[in-house]
Image (spheres, rainbow, N blue to C red):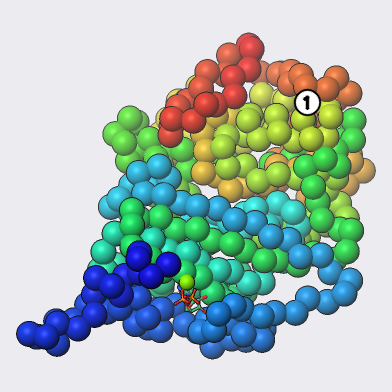
Amino acid sequence: MQHDALSLTSGFSAHDPCYAMPSEFDLIRRYFTHPARSADMAVGDDAALFRTAPDVQLAVTTDTLAAGTHFFHDTPPHDLGWKTLAVNLSDLAAMGATPRWATLALTLPAVDEGWVAAFAKGFFDCAGRYGMELVGGDTTRGPLAMTVTLFGEVPMGQAITRAGGLPGDDLWVSGWPGLAALGLMSLQNRVKLVDADSALAALHRPMPRVEAGEALRGIAHAMIDVSDGLAGDLAHLCERSKLGALLDMGALPLAPLIATGVDESLARQALLAGGDDYELLFSAPPQARDVLAALARTLDLPFTRIGQFTEKAGTILLADGPKVPLRPLDVRGYDHFALPG
Ligand code: ADP
Ligand code: MG
């Protein structure tokens, strides 16, 4: 990809070599090269090399964040580095996989070394937190975007798919879905939050539920990560499990949302139709309730039981609590799932 390479437009200036912009290779060497730990070959050669055990399945996922579509151009680069990896980690978490290796394709409009340094710091902070390694990537010029591909491991046959749900399973959600949507709305001045800190932290520095995903192997029947609003992601879970769901509107974990200063109706909308949460939505048999309560305490992460799977494929019924029609919240211009009241 020589045409797009940053090095073509940087390189040394004949007049003042001190002002030379760092080349693509300088950036990779300075900011994206850490010594390989578990990989046999990481950054620096034509391809990365790593080994997986014979009784392990490789879980692979990729996601792109594009400026203007997934984040504002002025998002702090450290947060962006963190989030770029975190959103991908959430997909591995949702399979019950253990994250191991990542590649990063970075498209930059120009070389702003301070920006790259902060972005890389955020990326490696997240990689370190989740015990994974950057083993390769690509660096080119163009509209700001980053694509991460993640490789994770899961013991043979133990991945938790969207399709494994059984009628009568409880439905659970981790953490505080809806907070990130409120954070986005407050940045857009569409809502005034009394306390915006938790909402902005959820938006900028999501904590993918990797440990929870791993611990749910052998417990959860079906699982998905909540990235496009709980209602839409529940619909995906129902579709793949060929089931319906009864959603207990009175059980939704609204308290942390209401604590930011919004009313109950907006809190509910943010939770059901928001986005960017990266929580886990999963099903488990009712016999697992005690185990799940203990696990939530161990992980210091709430699991809220919000309903159950039903036989009637494709229908999501709302039980207990106000029967509100789920209008699309339209936080990011998505085609949000809309439910009848
Ligand atoms: P090639 O032209 O063979 O693709 P590159 O010059 O693109 O090689 O990359 C050189 C090395 O740097 C490769 O190991 C590649 O995986 C790695 N690399 C390039 N960009 C990044 C990045 N943003 N993050 C991590 N590794 C990178
Ligand atoms: Mg390349």
Q: Quadrant of residue 18?
A: bottom left
Q: Residue at x 36, y 49 (%)?
A: 67
Above or below — where is 283 with respect to 1?
A: above
Residue 122 visible to an observer of this rendering: no
**Left or right side of 280 for 133:** left
Image quadrant in which the N terminus is located: bottom left
Q: Is mark 1 within 8 Å of ligand 1?
A: no
**Left or right side of 203 for 108:** left
Above or below — where is 137 with respect to 305?
A: below
**Left or right side of 235 for 80:** left
Q: Residue at x 43, y 34 (%)?
A: 332
Please tell me whether mark 1 sits on a helix, a strand or a loop. strand
Above or below — where is 284 with respect to 6?
A: above
Dot 1 alpha-carbon crowd within 10 angstroms: few under 14, some 14 to 19, many 20 or more: many
Q: Nearer the viewer, residue 242 or 96?
A: 242
Image quadrant in which the C terminus is located: top right
Q: Quadrant of residue 50?
A: bottom right
The residue sitting at the right extreme is: 287
The residue sitting at the left extreme is: 15
Q: At which x and y percent is residue 313? A: 83, 22
Q: How many marks?
A: 1
Above or below — where is 254 with respect to 297?
A: above
Q: At which x and y percent is residue 98? A: 72, 66
Q: Nearer the viewer, residue 206 or 83?
A: 83
Q: What residue does disc 1 label? A: 245
Q: At which x and y percent is residue 140? A: 38, 65
Q: Residue at x 62, y 85 (%)?
A: 41
Amino acid tagged 1:
Ala
Q: Residue at x 34, y 31 (%)?
A: 191
Q: At which x and y percent is residue 178? A: 53, 37
Residue 177 visible to an observer of this rendering: yes
